[in-house]
Image: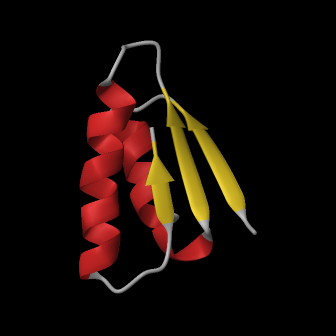
Amino acid sequence: MRRIGIIGSGKVGCSAASFLLAEADEILLYDIVPRLPVGEALDLQNAAEALGLNVQVKG
């Protein structure tokens, strides 16, 4: 299982996560702002499903 953790769920962190969707089995987003990683993870998870990628994105 390939896991990637990204610290920071802002524009740069989410851009990095979107580029890595096809490279990982699980992507974990972390941020100092409460609930921000959860919302961004949901957006990325929906994008991954639309692209047919088998990856779990969590925040």
Question: In the image, is 40 to the left or to the right of 58?
Answer: left
- Classify the position of the N terminus by image quarter: bottom right
Q: Residue 3, relative to residue 54: is it above or below?
A: above
Q: Quadrant of residue 7?
A: top right
Question: In the image, is 28 to the left or to the right of 34?
Answer: right
Q: Residue furthest right?
A: 1
Numbered-mark total: 0
- Coloured how? secondary structure
Depth check, front residue: 35 or 5: 35
Going 29% across and 50% down the picture, which residue do you hit?
42
Q: Residue 13, relative to residue 25: is it above or below?
A: above
Question: In the image, is 46 to the left or to the right of 18?
Answer: left
Q: Position of residue 8 (x, y in %)?
A: 48, 28
Depth check, front residue: 50 or 23: 50
Q: Position of residue 58 (x, y in %)?
A: 47, 46
Q: Quadrant of residue 59?
A: top left
Q: Quadrant of residue 52?
A: bottom left
Q: Residue furthest bottom?
A: 52
Q: Position of residue 44 (x, y in %)?
A: 32, 57
Going 30% across and 82% down the picture, which residue do you hit?
51
Going 24% across and 79% down the picture, which residue do you hit?
50
